[in-house]
Amino acid sequence: MEKQPYVYILASKKNGTLYIGVTSNLIQRIWQHKNTQVEGFTKKYNVHILVYYEHHEIMQSAITREKQMKKWKRDWKIKLIEKDNPQWLDLWLEIQ
């Protein structure tokens, strides 16, 4: 799973604060979030649960998708998460 473009959503808890990001190394980036090594929003609001991710073939499409999702209404984001992860489980173990 290394060096491939991903868009991901982190949550503070079920129906909690959401964060959308993009990365070329999903495992490393989520580890950084979980270990509060990323300054800013996720550290400040304790947003560390990986609830959704999607792979993209090229980084530009991942960046475009991230920007698109950030403009979505909250309920659209929740529907996307709950489509594949209705219990809001932490997907961290799935990607390791």
Image (cartoon, helix red, strand yellow):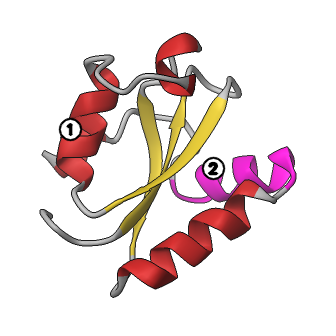
Quarter of the image for residue 49 reads top left
Q: In the displayed structure, would residue 10 be above or below residue 13?
A: below
Kind of residue at disc 1: Leu
Q: Nearer the viewer, residue 89 or 11?
A: 11
- Amino acid of disc 2: Glu
Left or right: 26, with 96 as reference point = right
The stretch drawn in magenta includes residue 75: yes
Helix, strand or loop under label 1: helix
Residue 76, x across and y down, in percent = 80, 56
- At a point 72% along the width and 52% down the height, the residue shown is 77
Disc 2 is placed on an element classified as: helix
What residue sits 67% from the left and 26% below the top? Answer: 17
| Structural distance between the alpha carbons of marks 2 and 1 | 18 Å
Few, some or many residues within 10 Å of mark 1 (<14, 14–19, 20+): few
Asked whether the residues under the numbered discs 2 and 1 touch, taking CB atoms below 8 Å apart as contact, a structural biologist would say no
Picture coordinates of residue 72, whole percent (x, y): 81, 58
Nearest to the observer: residue 87 or residue 36: 36
Q: Which residue is mark 1?
A: 93
2 or 1: tag closer to the N-terminus: 2
Quadrant into which the C terminus falls: top left
Indicate whether 88 appears above or below 83: above
In the picture, the disc for residue 82 is 2
Q: Which residues are magenta?
A: 73-84
Dominant secondary structure of the magenta stretch? helix
Estimate the x, y position of residue 47 in percent, counting from the top left.
51, 23
- In the image, taking residue 25 as reference, residue 64 lies left or right, namely right
At horizontal 28% and vertical 22% (from top left) the residue drawn is 37
